[in-house]
Amino acid sequence: MKRYNEKDLSLKSFIVLSRANHAVEEKIREDIRKHGLNTTEFAVLELLHHKGDQPIQRIGKKILLSSGSITYVVDKLEEKQLLKRIRCPEDRRVIYAGITDKGKDLMNDIFPKHKEAIQSIFGELNDSEKKTLISLLKKLGLSLKNK
């Protein structure tokens, strides 16, 4: 392996991480597109499918979207009859998004396939390597929150 100084290793780490992330995200997008959704629509449905009804504002924070973008995505999913808006009975200012039966059926069909696609993407790594990757990425991400 080529010898790198500390600064070069940081830059090389960034480049390798960026390229790997791009490759993984592209494969994920391809998988999700097969099911007639984009990645943001899928992320919203996956959240609602696994966590239940959510205030629309909270969805944006959980999947890292601006309020304007989340409104657009919710509108699109509502048009597709995959989710519905539910007014909070205690506070009329709060609107929840809930997955419809059609949305549940879709997620029950595609989520296992999506999980298999992810397992295939990471199939090059053994369990020990995956655990190391998780640990290192957590360490990196958490260290940046304190800066």
Image (cartoon, rainbow, N blue to C red):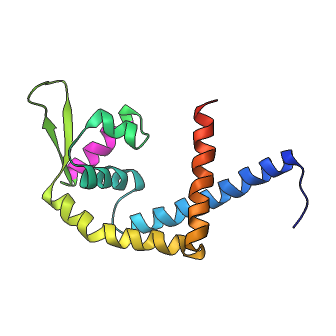
Q: Is residue 93 left or right of residue 136?
A: left
Which residue is pictured at 13% across the width and 25% down the height? 92
Q: Is residue 74 magenta?
A: yes
What are the residue bounds of the magenta stretch? Answer: 69-79
Number of numbered discs: 0
Which residue is pictured at 58% across the width and 74% down the height? 126
Q: Is residue 28 left or right of residue 94?
A: right
Indicate the position of residue 135 as horizontal and vertical percent values.
59, 54
Residue 67, compared with residue 74, is above or below; it is above
Query: Viewer-proximal residue, 17 or 31?
Result: 17
Indicate the position of residue 91 as horizontal and vertical percent values.
14, 24
Residue 98, compared with residue 110, is above or below; it is above
Indicate the position of residue 143 as horizontal and vertical percent values.
62, 38
Q: Is residue 28 visible?
A: yes
Location of the N terminus (image quadrant): bottom right
Mainly helix, strand or loop, the magenta region? helix
Which residue is pictured at 52% across the width and 66% down the height? 27
Q: Is residue 22 visible?
A: no
Which residue is pictured at 41% across the width and 74% down the height? 116
Indicate the position of residue 97 as horizontal and vertical percent values.
21, 42
Residue 76, compared with residue 66, is above or below; it is below
View extreme (left): residue: 89
Query: Viewer-proximal residue, 3 or 84?
Result: 3
Q: Is residue 8 magenta?
A: no
Location of the C terminus (image quadrant): top right
